[in-house]
Amino acid sequence: MKVLIGTRNPHKLAECLRILGEIPGIEWVTFRESPFPEVPEEGESLEENAAKKAQELARLTGLPTLAEDSGLEVAALGGAPGVRSARFAGDQKDYRANNEKLLSLLSGVEDRRARFRTVAALALPDGRLWLREGGLEGEIARALRGTGGFGYDPLFIPIGEARTLAEMSPEEKDAISHRRRALERMRPLLLALASGGIPEEGGPL
Ligand code: ITT
């Protein structure tokens, strides 16, 4: 069965493909084989945006679609940038500008606590929907460090770590990431989908 991975972000796509790996009975389709338009992210929550991306792309392509919306929530900023993480410093989705804005807002701020959150959504062309989430707690570094990963990784130090996510290998990031946790919670549903026995929608996030 073909399942579309509904992201146009190449870094996210690479992480999703690495984390999901081979699932018996599923052939992953990406925007490279099946180009699709950007779905506007206008929702007020990661849940809303993930659901909208998955449902619109499933309807458009006729394929079961796995999409996700992720965000960085910083305690001292009341949970910002959150659902606006991609466009924190403007519509051009510029990682460096986003990181610089975050560093300047936190300049002189002692409370550096933050977390990444991913909400994964699986939608069928008939509109049925399943959501699962994963999080990673940590803190915001005082300067950019490392060249791995993407987005806010050079500023995010997971709890219990000295390094930022960008200083870790891809495998080290994958082992603990918010994306990993959300997709692992999605895996049983994907296995069930492939074997024709997916449960009714709903269930815990
Ligand atoms: P799609 O909507 O096509 O999936 P996007 O980049 O717009 O791609 P999001 O709306 O989920 O995806 O944007 C989330 C932003 O949060 C992303 O652009 C990064 O800046 C950041 N982000 C998400 N996951 C991250 C991660 O694992 N590490 C660092 N930053 C991340």
Image (cartoon, helix red, strand yellow):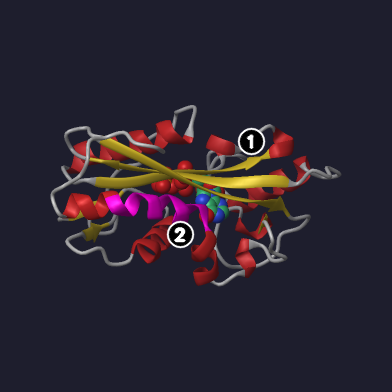
Q: Quadrant of the C terminus?
A: top left
Give residue 176's position: percent from left, percent from top: 53, 61
Query: Magenta stretch: dominant SS?
Result: helix
Q: Are discs 2 and 1 less than 8 Å apart at CB?
A: no
* Image side of residue 65 versus residue 181, left or right: left
Residue pictured at 48% horizontal, 31% vertical: 45
Q: Residues within 10 Å of mark 2 (few under 14, many from 20)?
A: few
Residue underneath mark 2: 11
Residue pictured at 69% horizontal, 61% vertical: 160
**Foreground pick, 9 / 77:** 77
Q: Is residue 59 visible?
A: yes
Q: Dot 2: what SS?
A: helix
Identify the disc placed on residue 80. 1
Q: Inspect the image, locate mark 1, and give the three-letter code of the amino acid beneath it.
A: Ala
Identify the disc placed on residue 57. none
Q: Quadrant of the N terminus?
A: bottom left
* Image side of residue 156 versus residue 46, left or right: right
Q: Is residue 34 visible?
A: no
Numbered range of the magenta stretch = 177-188
The image quarter containing residue 56 is top left
Magenta highlight on residue 182: yes
Give residue 159's position: percent from left, percent from top: 67, 56
Residue farthest to the right, as pictured: 108
Residue pictured at 19% horizontal, 43% vertical: 61
Pointer 2 or 1: first along the chain: 2
Q: Inspect the image, locate mark 2, and give the three-letter code of the amino acid beneath it.
A: His
Residue pictured at 70% horizontal, 51% vertical: 139
Give residue 11's position: percent from left, percent from top: 45, 59
